[in-house]
Image (tube, helix red, strand yellow):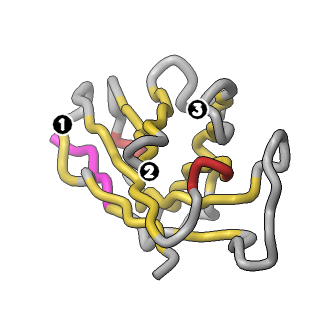
Amino acid sequence: QVQLVESGGGLVQPGGSLRLSCAASGFTSSKYAITWYRQAPGKERELVGRISSTGGSTNYADSVKGRFAISRDNAKNTVYLQMNNLKPEDTAVYSCDASRDYSGHVFYTSDPYDVWGQGTQVTVSS
């Protein structure tokens, strides 16, 4: 079954840290870039950051730059979002998305184009 499963969300105080995981199964996730998104109640979905298939390239939204870091362990088919110095405005449902990274990879019709996870809730509150 092709899927992404996020975990690691929860309640944390302002200034605290959390590490989210995005575990892939059912497809060759090492050929895919992973993007983290978040959506707060009543707000549009926001791109948090992205990591290339090899992990050699990352980029982040200005709102999280310097506080969040994305990494990946392709041997474990898992991508991580380390969140430090959390603020109440970081409260949202965080989701990961796998999209084809055509740099140096060959894709077949059996490879999915896009895979989304179900999301995990992060609440930053005292």
- Element at badge 3? loop
Residue at 69%, 73% in the rendered image = 112
Sequence-earlier tag: 3 or 2:
3
Q: With respect to residue 110, does 18 lie above or below?
A: above
Dot 2 surroundings within 10 Å: few (below 14), some, or many (20 or more)? some
Residue at 67%, 47% in the rendered image = 33
- Give the CA distance from mark 2 to mark 1: 30 Å
Sequence-earlier tag: 2 or 1:
1
The residue that label 1 is drawn on is 13
- Give the CA distance from mark 3 to mark 2: 27 Å
- 120 and 53: which one is in front? 53
The residue that label 2 is drawn on is 77
User: In the picture provided, is 99 more to the left or to the right than 30?
Assistant: right
- Identity, as a three-letter code, of the amino acid under mark 1: Gln
- Element at badge 2? loop
The residue that label 3 is drawn on is 63
Residue at 59%, 48% in the rendered image = 30
Q: Quadrant of residue 53?
A: top right
| Magenta stretch: includes residue 78 | no
Question: What range of the chain is rendered magenta?
Answer: 121-126
Residue 47 percent coordinates (x, y): 64, 49
Magenta span: helix, strand or loop, mainly?
strand
User: In the picture provided, is 111 more to the left or to the right than 1?
Assistant: right
- Identity, as a three-letter code, of the amino acid under mark 3: Ser
